[in-house]
Amino acid sequence: MSQAKVDKYKQDKANRQKIMKKQKLMHRLEMTGIALVTVLLVGWIGFSIYDKASSNDGSKETVVFDAGAVQDYMTELTAE
């Protein structure tokens, strides 16, 4: 090994605790960010679905079916 590699290895070994702490902190921050984005995305999708479902409540049309003609037809069939 060259002297530069040996010096770098010694420096990395001396600072290994600091490097590991920094890596763990960065990993936790990344996981927290991913979790936050996921929660916000799921919340936004849920709210959008709820908003669409609740906005359709007032615009539903009521359909009235007059069954008089069907009843007349049925009575004619049973009479014969």
Image (cartoon, grey):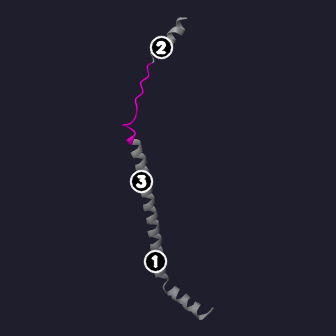
Q: Name the image quarter holding residue 9.
A: bottom right
Tell me the residue at 48%/78% (across/down). 20
Secondary structure, mark 3, is helix
Upstream in sequence: badge 3 or badge 2: 3
Q: Nearer the viewer, residue 47 or 15?
A: 47
Residue found 45% across the figure and 18% down from its top: 67
In the rendered structure, which disc, 1 or 2, sits on the residue that comes first in sequence? 1
Q: Which mark is residue 49?
A: none
Q: Which residues are magenta?
A: 54-66
Residue 75: where, in percent of width, then height?
A: 50, 9
Q: CA distance from mark 1 to mark 2?
A: 81 Å
The Cα atoms of the two marked residues, 3 and 2, are separated by 50 Å
In the image, residue 53 lies at what x, y percent? 41, 42
Look at the image and tell me in which quarter the N terminus lies. Answer: bottom right
Give the residue displayed 47% in from the left and 15% down from the top: 69
Local crowd size for mark 3, using a 10 Å CA cut-off: few (<14), some (14–19), many (≥20): few
Residue found at the far top of this picture: 80
Question: Relative to 4, is 63 on the left or the right?
Answer: left
Compared to residue 51, the image places residue 32 above or below, namely below
Q: Which class describes the residues within 10 Å of circle 1: few (<14), some (14-19), or many (20+)?
A: few
Q: Residue furthest right?
A: 1
Q: Amino acid at mark 1?
A: Lys
Q: Residue at x 58, y 90 (%)?
A: 5
Mark 2 element type:
helix
- Tell me the distance, in whole angstroms, between the alpha carbons under discs 3 and 1: 33 Å
**Which labelled disc corresponds to residue 22?**
1
Q: Which residue is mark 2?
A: 71
Dot 3 and dot 2 residues touching (CB under 8 Å): no
Q: Which residue is mark 3?
A: 44
